[in-house]
Amino acid sequence: MQKIILGIFLLLVFSTACKKKIGPVQTPVNDSAYLITKTIANDSLSVDVVIDKPKGTSFDVLMVFHGTVTYDSLILEAAYNTLDGFKRILDRKDMMIVSVAYPEENLLFGDNVKHAEAALLWVKNKAAAELGLQINKVFLAGHSQGGYVVTRLNTLQETNGVIANAPGPLNLVFRCQLEEEGKIANGVVCNLLKTKYGTTTVNPEAYQARSLLKFTNSYKSDILFVQGLDDSPIQMTSWPLFKQKVTDCTDCKKVQVYEVAGFGHQSLFENADAKVEFNRFIAER
C-alpha cells in the first residue's frame, strides 16, 4: 500500500520538483537568444507556452509537456520546470524548446488534449510568422500525463517524432477502482470522472475511453516510449499490456520501447542510457 501511495505522489510532483522564477512576457528581438512566456491562440483555444530560443533564426523545435500538477495556478511553473528537465538531457543546443502549460483544473481527464493540439498547430502553422524565424522539424516529448498527451497527439497530428516517458494513466478503470475501494486516497481526476459518469462498476466504458490503453494504434509519427520498471504499481500493472499493444500495432509508424531496470517514474531524466536513447531518437530523424 505504501508503494502505491508513493507512486501516486511521484506522478504528481515531478513538475514542481525544482523551483524556477517565471520570466515576463516579452517581445522577441531579431536573432538573439531569449526565454519568454507567450499566450498563443489557434482557432478558439488559447494556451500559455514558454519559449526557449537559442541565438539564430532557423530551428528544429522540441515541444515538451509537463506531468500532472492538478491546479492551473501551478501549470506555468510546471512548464518552466519541464523545459529545464528536458533541456538538461538534450544534447543539441541549437533546438528551440517550447513548453506547453496545458490546463488541468476542472477538466475531465483527456479533455486538455485539444489545448495541446492547439499549441502544436500554432508551432506548425503560425509560430514562424509571429516570432520572425523559420521552423524546420518538430518533435514532441512528454513526461507522465505529458507522455499521455503526446501519445494522443500522435494519433491526431504528424510530427518528426514523439518521445513519451512513463506515459499515463494507462488504465483509469484500475486506478479509479482503487480509490472507490478505499485502497488509495481520492484524487481530483477520478472524482471528476465519477461525478460525470458514475463509478467504474456502473460505467467502465467511459473510463476506458480516456485511458491510454485505448490509444495504441494509428500513430502518425515514429514514437519512443521510455518506462522505468520500478515505477508505481498503478503504472506497472497495465504496462505489459500497453507495451504489447503498441508493439503489435499494424497501422503505426515505427514504435520503439525502452525499458529501464532499477529506475522509476523519472527514468528518462535519471538514467544515462535512457538519455542516450532519447538523443539518438531525435538525431536519427
Image (spheres, rainbow, N blue to C red):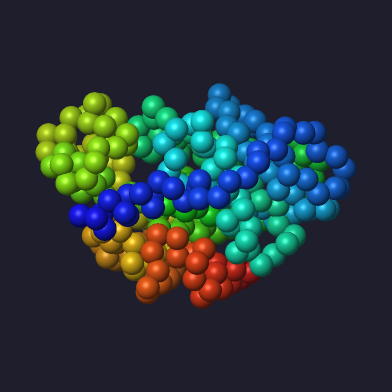
Q: Residue at the location (80% across, 33% down)?
A: 27
Is residue 177 found left or right of 224 in the rendered image?
A: left
Q: Residue at the location (36% across, 55% down)?
A: 217
Viewer-closest of 198 and 178: 178
Q: Tell me where residue 170 appears, x and y as whole percent.
A: 31, 52
Q: Residue at the location (59% across, 68% down)?
A: 279
Q: Tell me where residue 83 appears, x and y as whole percent.
A: 61, 50
Quick check: can you spot residue 211?
Answer: yes
Q: Residue at the location (52% across, 37% down)?
A: 75
Is residue 86 found left or right of 255 in the rendered image?
A: right
Q: Is residue 260 above or below residue 49?
A: below
Write down the quadrant of residue 48 in the picture. top right
Q: Tell me where residue 96 appears, x and y as whole percent.
A: 70, 52
Quick check: can you spot residue 214?
Answer: no
Quadrant where the image shows the C terminus? bottom right
The residue lying furthest to the right in this view is 30
Q: Is residue 29 above or below residue 61?
A: above
For the image, the number of numbered tags is 0
Viewer-closest of 147 and 89: 89
Is residue 89 found left or right of 152 in the rendered image?
A: right
Quadrant where the image shows the N terminus? bottom left
Q: Tell me where residue 34 appears, x and y as whole percent.
A: 78, 45
Viewer-closest of 112 and 192: 192
The residue lying furthest to the top in this view is 44
